[in-house]
Image (spheres, helix red, strand yellow):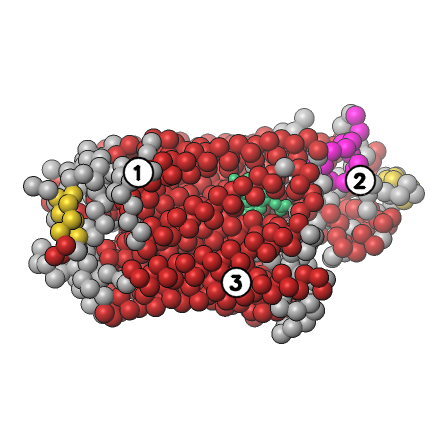
Amino acid sequence: MAHPSDNYLTHTRGIKSWLLTLDHKRIGIMYLVTILGAFLLAGIFALLIRTELLTPGQTIVTADTYNRLFTLHGAIMIFLFVIPGIPSALGNFVLPLQLGAKDVAFPRLNLFSYYLFVFGAALMVLSIIVGGVDTGWTFYTPYSTDKARAGVIPVLTGVFLLGFSSIFTGLNFIVSIHKLRAPGMGWFRMPLFLWGLYATAIMQILATPVLGITLLLLIVERVLGVGIFDPGLGGDPVLFQHFFWFYSHPAVYIMVLPAMGVISELVSVHSHKHIFSYKMIAWSSVAIAVFSFFVWGHHMFVSGQSAMANMIFSALTFSVAIPTAVKVFNWLATMFRGAITLTTPMCYAVAFLSLFAIGGLTGMFLGSLATNVHVTDTYFVVAHFHFTMVPVGVAFIGGLYHWWPKITGRMYSEKWGRIGCAVFVAGFYVTFVTQFIMGTHGMPRRSYHYLPEFTALHQMSSAGALAMATGLFIAAGTFIHSLVKGLPAAANPWGGASFEWQCPSPPPHDNFTETPPAGDPYDMSDWEYHPEIRGYVRKT
Amino acid sequence: MSREDPRVPHHFESAEQQTESARLGMWVFLATEILLFGGLFCAYSVYRANHPDVFYYGTQFLDKHLGALNTMVLICSSFTMAWAVRCAQLGERRALMVLLSMTLLCAALFLGVKAIEYRQKWKHGLLWARKFRAEALERSPTKAGATWAETASAKTTMAAPDGQPTSGPAASNPLTTGTKALAATAAFEDRTSIPPAGTAPAGVVSGKKSSAAKPSERTPPENVQVFFSIYFLLTGLHGLHVIAGMLAIGWILRRARRGEFSSGNFLAVDLVGLYWHLVDIIWIYLFPLLYLIH
Ligand code: HEM
Ligand SMILES: [Cu+2]
């Protein structure tokens, strides 16, 4: 079994051994491929949107098609890339390794939730395209209850299934973290990525079912006409918004907490320095998870909720910024006087910090009532959430580079990795800073038409989008190049001290022949670099 | 160490670790289920807080006796289920099978009674919003409703939102005029057909409650259909869970018949038991919230 060339990729062969695998690593890879496919698709839609916006009025598509495009772009990005990306793809691969376990607690459930994901994703995407759904990813009533939009029911069903896929993944992670930690690994000896996944899983368990019931209500509304959201039948359309954001605000942290977990790993390992204030980072994940359940109303300041509710939600919104800032300062303190190597993962980590800081701070603008009313439903909001969610994608790519040697057993080109990152980030700033400017000048979101004075800014934004796409293609090129020509990776190419670096790259089917002794996952002083294997080895 | 036990999957150290994991997993799943119902309970609270009169009024049409009967039935089933788990633990196969069958029987009884209730509602048109027939309120649907029905039946007069009184026939009744599809957008053009802001059922919108100071049991308030929508949603979702529970119980019954359980291996019975208790507990909340409103 311990034959060196026997790893999880070669352990069994044939397409069936992949499709029916119970190995968390293979399931992680299947997620990775699916999710990257979705990312590409949504990216193409984004480019189409930006092309349409090159000129006021119709450029390449009609107003109706434009509405479908932004629905497709938003729904796919959110439900198929940003939410599942880190937990389902990277998390599935890394979590059992970091725990020192052989698999997640329920491997069958894991495979089941993968197929639920694939099925839900296919249903959602196909029926948006076939049924021409144009409600936006938020499915607001009465758009979504309007009979004329035929494809809505299968779309909602698809998202419902995706939700349960996400719940089962969360359930699996919670149980694995509780029960499968290696002997001697206390809660505060877990790598911080696991804390991020744990906090995320709790939110998936508690918030996603509320989305589930909301979607069910919409479906029942359309099929039977229960009238819960229909004022004509005595119902309340604003209640839909409450339900939706009760899920979807926590959902933004379902997206970002795993990303923050990744960043904790990248910053510490690539600065070769112990993480600063482990406990504060761990607890702030939990604090964010808790606070984020009480701020949903900040998406509804202009929906007609009472002034009292507005003020309370506004005040609570500010509280979320505290644990978020705690994390940012801890990462900066970790880097301070560290031995930083500007590897590609580190470049992405720094990019995350710079983008997310702006995203979070503009969240404060939006959380303040008076400013919000001025910029609500403008490009300011669009820019804000791209400054928060694109960093999640950035962390995802950074994490992918970080664990790539472990996943594939091969190294990639650092030079092109860095170039890709730089091009992407530069493009991002151009795309979205212009949108902040447009937003403060009143450019409304979700419109294919605009006043001629916005033309120049829109065109700059579109040019930026092209640069982002270029950066991503360069990154994709480095991955493909690595698969074909990459140098073999050492077990521990970065000098990390957590468990996943203590098994071979790629790991064997069972992960560990024997579980390594649990220690401080951020104490990297025991490891020294051996250039001949391009990796670190524990000092003897 | 039971590492060698072939039943334990390779990623668990011991059967004990497997059991603990499975139980924790079930508890976490139950938490998700509660939040799933939570959305509906929340809708219930919002509407009840905004329109208490609708709930006081609507509840009279539910049959308290049948509801109470069903509550008893489910409590019994919880009891037999708990006992079944105990028998599984003691390795008493016959008793386990008998008790599981009894649980199944109770569940079927529950659904039967529920079906009777649904049929009554269907007959009287006391249904969810779009199917709701307002004239149903003018008849005596249940024994519980008999006291008010005589007086309320003949001359129900309701004020239309714009102040003009309309009486009698359902066609001009504001309860039914709104049922046309797409009322939401259409209504905004036709300002007169939407209720004034203060009475609109708008969630946490500030403003006066639409209720009279005293809940009236005699004149039908506006929007009674909302009560029935919520009734059908809650009991319907619960009913689906009862069916899922029955399938699960049937599954372990089959396994029990094959002798797959022993005192050292009864995890599945334990987990299904937990699930079944949740289904019961939800009903224990539903019963007073829907049937026993005072
Ligand atoms: C300090 C943290 C944050 C604060 C204070 C904040 C605040 C806000 C506020 C007040 C809005 C509503 C704007 C409006 O519609 O008028 C908003 C919108 C939004 N935020 Fe954030 N936010 C924060 C972080 C995040 C994060 C981390 C994400 C995602 C990863 C995110 C994603 C979004 C999205 C998607 C929307 C727009 C939703 C839509 O209408 O389609 N935000 N944010
Ligand atoms: Cu929010």
Q: Determine whether, in the image, residue A286 is placed left or right of residue A68.
A: left
Residue that appears at 79% across and 37% down: B199
Residue picked out by circle 3: A464
Q: Chain of mark 1?
A: A
Q: Which residue type does callout 1 highlight?
A: Arg
Q: How much space separates mark 2 and mark 1, taking CA atoms?
A: 61 Å
Magenta span of residues: B198-213
Which residue of the protein is positioned furthest toward the bottom in this rendering?
A: A60
Q: Which residue type does callout 3 highlight?
A: Gly
Q: Which residue type does callout 2 highlight?
A: Ala
Residue picked out by circle 1: A337
Q: Chain of mark 3?
A: A
Q: How much space separates mark 2 and mark 3, taking CA atoms?
A: 46 Å
Q: How much space separates mark 3 and mark 1, taking CA atoms?
A: 34 Å
Residue that appears at 75% across and 49% down: A232
Residue that appears at 27% across and 39% down: A273
Q: Nearer the viewer, mark 2 or mark 3?
A: 3
Residue that appears at 74% across and 57% down: B182
Is residue B199 inside the magenta stretch? Answer: yes
Is residue A414 inside the magenta stretch? Answer: no
- Crowding at dot 3, Cα within 10 Å, few <14 / some 14-19 / many 20+, comes out as many
Residue B197: mark: 2
Helix, strand, or loop for circle 3?
helix
